Image (cartoon, rainbow, N blue to C red):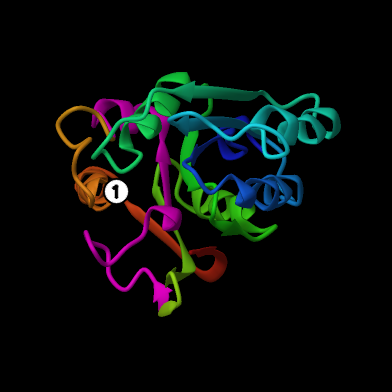
Amino acid sequence: MQPSLRPKFSIVMTLFETQHFLPRAIACMMDQNYHNWELILVSDGPAAREPYSPRRILRPLQKHFPANRIEYHELPRAEGCWGNVARAFGLERSEGDYICWVNHDNLIYPDYLRSHVRNIQRRPGCLSVVDIQLWREVRYYGRFPRAYRCSRIDLLCYTLPVGTARDLDAFGPPTERLYAADGRLFDAAARILPIQHQHRIVGVHF
């Protein structure tokens, strides 16, 4: 496989308050069947202490994946920014080819990254899209994306090249206070990148 077709993924995982979900999110990373990734965990505000300290929870991941870059950062709480300041910070730290933003209370299946790789192999440089299931608390919204546009696609559905994300100032000051900043980013990326979609459920957004 050519290096360009075996991309490195920067996984930016944002964390806020419900740290008891974090071990499950870390388990999802450990179960990935594609291993060329780095994990940048960013807490939007003070993180929990023991037993849910992010640094403690990350230790087994660092032990089992010594070749992968794993970082943890704790930022001051950015009120009214919906985690976007943490996402933008993660982008600044990214060293991969493609970036995925994952919330710590999401579930990603073992084939999540590999499904994106298949899209990128078919269409290098694409805006890669996969299917997920969407929940809001106890309400099930079904399968996403429903369309390739803002409010019809979820952040967990797509990944894009790190360079493009930086060019678009993803989650930066112009959009950091927008609840739907992820949809705006998708719309902007879709105007300049071809979309490649694998219609397979590989994650759950709670």
Is 7 displayed left or right of 196 in the figure? right
**Camera-nearest residue between 78 and 121:** 78
Q: Is residue 18 magenta?
A: no
Residue at coordinates 54% horizontally, 56% vertically from top-left?
106
Q: Is residue 94 visible?
A: no
Image coordinates of residue 52 in percent, x first then y, are 67, 39
Label 1 crowd (10 A; few <14 / some 14-19 / many >=20): many
Residue at coordinates 19% horizontally, 44% vertically from top-left?
178
**Quadrant where the N terminus is found in the figure:** top right
**Camera-nearest residue between 58 and 5:** 58
Q: Is residue 71 visible?
A: yes
Q: Which element is circle 1 on? A: helix
Q: Quadrant of residue 85?
A: top left
Image coordinates of residue 105 in percent, x first then y, are 54, 54
Is 201 displayed left or right of 36 in the figure? left
Image coordinates of residue 62 in percent, x first then y, are 78, 28
Image coordinates of residue 171 in percent, x first then y, are 28, 35
Q: How many marks?
A: 1
Q: Which residues are magenta?
A: 142-170
Q: Quadrant of residue 64?
A: top right
Q: Is residue 163 magenta?
A: yes
Q: Is residue 137 above or below residue 15?
A: below
* Residue receiving disc 1: 182
